[in-house]
Image: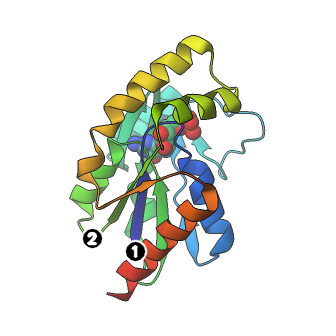
Amino acid sequence: MIVVVSGPGGVGKSTVVAELLRRHPDMHRSISVTTRAPRPGEVSGVDYCFVTEEQFTDWIDKGLFAEYADVRGHHYGTLMSSLQSVRLQEIIVLTIDIHGGPSIKRLFPEALMIFLKPPDVMELERRLECRGSETPEEIVGRIELGRYEMTFAKEYDYMVTNRDLDTTVDIVDSIVRSVLRR
Ligand code: 5GP
């Protein structure tokens, strides 16, 4: 089963998915391709597959992506090859932006679409500040973007408010399990 976890930047998608996978070794993450530079501690092939603009464009031309999007000046994409081999009982989780989700749904209509929502804009701001990887101007831009991104929630099957990590992971997990049992 393909599970798409999406939502505004800074809502905590990666943290939620990392904890979900830590608790459930039967779930796997799809490793996206990106042209952005690795952050400290990020490893190519583990966090992302980090590639050059030329490489990314070449892969677009060759039709290798199931979806790709530009997020804050960088390309991000999911390779078709990461999804085509998904077996029936296998759970593969995609942590992607709000534009990527609907593209996956068009290609894989059975994909489970989960939208993570911040409790409120102040909380989103606090999280972005805590992360410390953005300047104040970038944070303002991210918050405006966050408001816009919220309008995409209707494209998703479930909306989960990320108040605290444990509860969010429990909810996402139970959604996945209940859909899997159908
Ligand atoms: P970051 O650079 O902070 O890791 O990610 C920036 C944004 O890009 C996040 O919203 C993340 O979910 C999104 N993203 C990561 N991988 C993909 C992908 O393969 N496709 C799309 N559409 N978005 C992605």
Task: Please report whichever mark, 1 or 2, sits nearer to the chain's N-terminal start.
Answer: 1
Residue 8's spot in the image, x, y percent? 43, 38
Give the quarter of the figure containing the N terminus. Answer: bottom left
Q: Give me the residue at 55% from left, 70% from top.
A: 170
Q: Secondary structure at mark 2?
A: loop
Furthest-top residue in this view? 137
In the figure, residue 27 lies in which quadrant? bottom right
Side (left or right) of 79 relative to 164: left
Residue 52: image location, x then y, percent: 55, 30
169 vs 65: above or below: below
Vertical arrangement, residue 141 with respect to residue 167, above or below: above
- Residue, disc 1: 1
Q: Position of residue 171 (x, y in %)?
A: 49, 68
Q: Which residue is mark 2?
A: 110
Would you call the spot at circle 1 few (<14 residues within 10 Å), some (14-19), or many (20 or more)? many
Which amino acid lies under the numbered mark 1 shown in the image of this protein?
Met
Query: Are the two marked residues, 1 and 2, in contact with CB atoms closer than 8 angstroms?
Result: yes
- Marks 1/2: CA–CA distance: 8 Å
* 99 or 166: nearer the viewer: 166
Tell me, for residue 134, which label it has, or none.
none
Residue farthest to the bottom?
181
Which residue of the protein is positioned furthest toward the right in this rendering? 41
Going by the numbered disc 2, the residue's amino acid type is: Glu
Q: Residue at x 65, y 26 (%)?
A: 129
The correct choice, above or below, for 118 with respect to 95 in the image is above
- Is residue 135 something that shows in the picture? yes
